Structures are given as structure tokens and as C-alpha cells.
Amino acid sequence: MGTNGLHNLKRNFFDLDKHRSIRVATVALFVANGLGMSSWIAHIPLLKERLELNDQMLGLALLCAGMGALGTMWISGWIMSRFGSRKIAILSGTFLSLSLIGPGIATSFWSLAISLLLLGACNGLMDIAMNSQAASYEGLVRKPVMSSFHAFWSLSCWCGSLCGSVFLAAPAWTWAHLPLIALVGLSLTLFARRGLLRTEPGINSAPVLSFPRGILAVFGLLCLLVMMTEGAVADWAGVHLRTSYHVSEYMTVFGYNAFALFMTIGRFAGDPLARSFGHKTVIVGSAVVSGICMGIAALAPTAWISIGAFGLAGFGIANLVPLLFSLAAKRAGGGIEQATSSVFATGYFGFLIGPPLVGFISSRTTLPFALVSLACGLFVVASTVLRLNGAREEEPGAGIQEPEGQGSR
């Protein structure tokens, strides 16, 4: 009895150590992605002025990033079914870091558009691969952890935004910001290489393009509405502060900085909240809070009130995508990589249409009015989940098995 107990203790210890290494490696990917994307976002207001772009031209340039991301997301399920999410995560993470340099050295609208197309393609593929790794890990440990991975992504976004404000406050060193972040991203990707889950390539040939069906399609459309707001805040919060309140250049990042900071706080609290109140309650409450705060941020009388409202909107929107994505993954059975790619690709379409849609609306009305319109989508999310029977809870990790080959790492 004592021998068996000692054997079980040793086995649990090594399993815990193995799971911890997988978690740390996956977190490293989320941090590399968040640092890279938030660092590029910090340069948007400066690039808009330097390249003399109007709102519509900037929206079209941002559209290229969305097109690149959407293109790789739609085929990512097919790619990962052939090579596994681990290899794709490493490859896309490497190229994402390198592609960060392109927008910083753009000299015209077209060079910016082409560099953003490449950046978006790498980001889309990495986004699906790292979320597939996170979903597989959540099934492995059989408890809600998806929000915590997204919390580390939000924390890295906040750090990247803060770092961007430091470099923008020192114009002589602004040029070094994106190359430095690219080096950090490469280092984190190489660090994660040894610890990631080695998922087996699919046996059956998967379709090149995969689309969500049934309840997964509903989750995909809800993610679309949420991601539309996330992308618009990331790309337009700084422009809103600059044009509506005429803040200094270094203050243009404060809106997204507050958004990312409070999103991080909300996501670290997301898993305990989901366990205590359930996914449905957390999603509905979060969507209502974020919708109200988006309206305040757009119409606030002062810049500081707008910045604070962006922060509270980030807290509200923090767990919407992770919880919706987690519910979708639990209904995927054994085809996590195919299902997550189709749902996330549908959701990421919001990043594709969100920023240019804001630019289109603002060019014909005002930027505050365009931001207010985003709140309507969040209220749609809340009302839909209230009536969605498919949002009931399921046992964490149902239908998910530990990928084979992990022990040979």
C-alpha cells in the first residue's frame, strides 16, 4: 500500500511538472503575440500623420492586416491537420516577429498595406495555433483555464502599449522600438519550442476551408461581434483621443493602454468567475458592462473620462471571447484544431471589418458616432446568450484526450 502510494505520488509530481512546462510554453506564445501586436498598434497614430493618411485610407490599410489574418485562419485547420499545431505555432511565431519591422519602415500607403498584409497573415495563423494549444491543454487538465491564457496575452498587450508610449515619448529612439520587440518575440518563440504539446496530424484528410455549423456557427458569430469591438478599440482609441481631445502624441496610447490593463485584470478573474457563476451569467453581464462603457468612452466630455471608460470596457469585454471559445472547443469532440480554426476564423472576421467599418462610418458621420455603434453589437451578444440553450455548462475537457507523443518530448 505504501509502495503504491509512493508510486502515485511520484507519478502525480512528474505529471504536474510536465503540465507546468506545457502551460509555460503556451503562455510564452501568447505573450510573444500580444507584445508584437500591441507594439505595432502603438505606432498607428504616428504613421497616420507621417504618411498623411485620412481615416478611410488608414481603414483600408488596416483592412489588409485583417485580410491577411482571415486568409490564413480559414486554411489553418487544414494546415494543422497535416502538420500539427505545435509546428505551425513555432513557424508563425517566428515570421510574426520578423514582420513587425515592416510597418515601422513603411514610406507610403502601399508599402504600409503590403507589410500589414504579411503581418496579418502571420498573426492569423499564430492566433489559431496558440489557441489550439491552449484548448488542448484545457482538455488535458480538465478545468477552466482559457481565460488565464488570454489574461497573459492582455498583460503583454498592456506592457507592449506602455513600452510603445515610452519610445514615442523619445522620438530619437522610436525607430528602435519594433526591432527590439521583434527580437523579444523571436526569443519567446524559441523558448516555447520544447514545451508545446505535440499533437498528432489528422489521419483523415481535412477540407482546405472549414466553416462552423450548428451551435458552433452561433459561437463564431458572437465572437465576431466581440472581436469587432476589440479590433476597433485597438486601432482607433488613439486616433479618437488625438482628434477629439487633441492630446499629445505620447498620450494617444493611454486609451488602449487602459483597455488592455483592465482586460488583463478581468481575464485573470475570468476562470474563478466562470466556476462560481457559470459561463452564461459571466458572458451576459460582461457584454452589458462593455457596451455601456463603450458609449461613455465615445461621448465623454474629457480625454481622461474617455480613457477611464475604455479601461472599464476592457474589463467587461475581457472574458467574452475566451468563454465563448472555450464552450465551442468543448463541443468539438476530437476535432479541436478543425473546430477552433473555423470558429476563430469566423470571429476574427470582426477584426477584418471592425477597423475599416469604423473608418467608413466616421468619414461620413463622426468617429464618436462610429464607436457608439460598436456598443450595439455587444448588446446583441448579451441578448443572444440569454436565449441560447447551447450555452449551458459542460464538464471541462469533455471529449478531449491528451495528445499522443507528448512523452517523447
Image: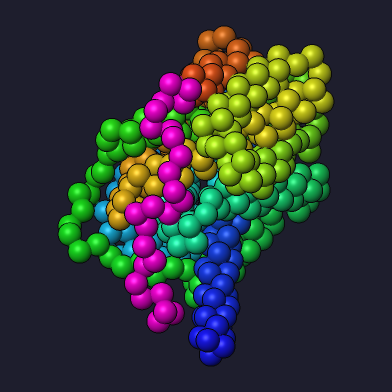
Instruction: State the image coordinates of residue 4 (x, y, percent, origin top left).
Output: 51, 86
The residue sitting at 36% across, 62% down in the picture is 401
Question: Left or right: 84 with respect to 256?
Answer: left
Q: Magenta segment: does it hold 397? A: yes
The residue sitting at 66% across, 60% down in the picture is 180
The reply to whether residue 217 is visible in this rendering is yes
Q: Which colouring convention does the figure follow?
A: rainbow
Question: Left or right: 73 with respect to 236?
Answer: left
Instruction: State the image coordinates of residue 400 (x, y, percent, origin top left).
Output: 37, 57
**Main secondary structure found in the magenta portion:** loop
Residue 186 appears in which quarter of the rendering? Answer: bottom right
The reply to whether residue 69 is visible in this rendering is no
Q: Name the one closer to the observer, 298 or 215.
A: 215
**As drawn, 220 above or below 241:** below
- The span shown in magenta is 384-409
Instruction: State the image coordinates of residue 362 (x, y, percent, origin top left).
Output: 56, 16
Q: Name the one closer to the observer, 338 or 122.
A: 338
The residue sitting at 26% across, 43% down in the picture is 210
Q: Residue furthest top?
A: 365
The residue sitting at 28% across, 65% down in the picture is 201
Q: Magenta segment: does it hold 345? A: no
